[in-house]
Image (tube, helix red, strand yellow):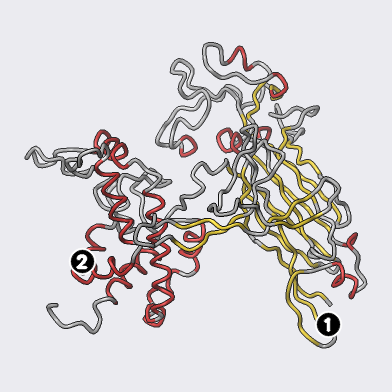
Amino acid sequence: MIDRIWLYPPLAIARLGPSPMPCDNYGWGPSDLSPRGSGKTTVVPAPTLDLAPDGSLTERLPEIPEGMPAVALFKDDEDRWRPVCPYFELHGTWTSGGSRRTGPLTEAVLAEFGLTLADLGWKVAVANLKAHHYTQSDGDRVEALTEVRGDENTPRPLAGRSPQGAENPLVPADRSLPLGFVQVPAPNDALPELRLRFRPGAGAVYGPTDLDARAEGTDYELPPQRLILDPAALWCGFPLQNTSDDPRTVPGGLFAGAEISDKQESLGLVDDICDGTVTATLPGGLEATARIVVSPPDFAPDRRPFVSIADGLADRVERAEVKDPAYLAEKPLTTLEIRDLFERILETMGNINVDVQNERVRDAYGEDLDGDGVNDRGPLPVPAPLNGVLLALTDGGRRRHRRYVALEVLEDLLREQPDLIRRVIREPVEDAPDYLDGRMPVAMRGADAGPFHLTRRQYDLLTGWADSLRENTEPGS
């Protein structure tokens, strides 16, 4: 019998796009660490699944012209963004012939226990609660739910609607806000696994039927077919003063209408971003749930953040492991983790104009605290640029971090300056200053508008790894 099921991946990020062609699949390859290489992580093609409208599923490898590096296409020929459409695959454990099995579930596995594809149920529930977050009105919720059997292979729309029993529903009863599609592929001999694909929305914005009057004198214009929302809903015209005692409006300016100084109220616009859950069920009370999150296109797809979702999750559940001497003693493992961190730092540096961000910090935070004419807090001192270099901080930072991905260089630096990490990298502590200073990561604000920092796990791993470099060295060397 099948005694446990789960979905892989447990969390997936879909990305908006109006193109009918989803993005191909690519993976990260080895870093280019050759003497004249970029130091950046390369991209390699990965098997890609194509799903036809009738549910037929095929696999291919993205084509790369001979002699050319891998090029990931994010737009089609008509300059439309290609959506990222993740698949959820059903896995489980079962006993067969006296043996314990674990792996992807297939139609053959179901048949072994007297089940068919029709016994597999999928349920996808998503919502856009941005307006509701501000107004707290049930009528401003936008939700969609669809259920499909494992043998139903045509696309199913996720039609976003507001609760019609609530006061002044944002989406009227005769309208819907498209939040994407789901589709169950038909398994075949080559691809027998049981899956569901989530396709997000196009990346469109919808507004109230009277938007033209509300937005008069502004650049907010929408096609008539997207003016579907009820102007009587609380979200349309909701006053949004940025007050410190109302956390819903911090940071300010995150709504259409905030820039209209004589109104300071919402124009009632809503996009087709959403998030929610994907659930698979089998007879006998078996149930598996995964989360789906929809986000805009990745405008810097070859630049990975140095603090990722995975880092945040690891910080919650695996923070203590980096304090274990046995973990740090696994030098090959920890070294790979440190190298990955510095590769991502380099990629982030390649996506930021540090000079502009530094000047922004100077304007916002810089102060001469002791009256000596020196800006005591905030920005980095700007070095004199080299000939032909316009952005001295940006260029210098990229050159340094290009060297640090060759860990031998970084290791030698840390052996020579044992206090370097603690001196130049911002520690994640509760009583950190509420302003940005010259410590790394420089000139970057976190989600709470405070100084950005590594996770506690990353920081402890980095300092522990740096301390281990000086173990068994001659005193004073």
Where is residue 189 shown, x and y percent of the image? 84, 66
Where is residue 435 shown, x and y percent of the image? 28, 44
Q: Residue at x 46, y 39 (%)?
A: 247
Quadrant location of the C terminus? bottom left
- What is the residue that sits farthest to the left in this orientation? 372
Q: Quadrant of residue 60?
A: bottom right
Front residue of this view, candidates 286 and 421: 421
Mark 1: amino acid: Ser
Q: Is residue 382 above or below residue 337?
A: above
**Cα separation between marks 1 and 2:** 58 Å
Quadrant location of the N terminus? bottom right
Q: Residue at x 41, y 52 (%)?
A: 347
Mark 2: amino acid: Asp
Report whether 257 appears left or right of 415. right
Q: Is residue 147 above or below residue 338?
A: above
Q: Quadrant of residue 40?
A: bottom left
Where is residue 274 shown, x and y percent of the image? 64, 42
- Secondary structure type for disc 2: loop
Where is residue 214 shown, x and y percent of the image? 58, 15
Q: What residue sits right under mark 2 in the picture?
A: 419
Q: Quadrant of residue 364?
A: top left
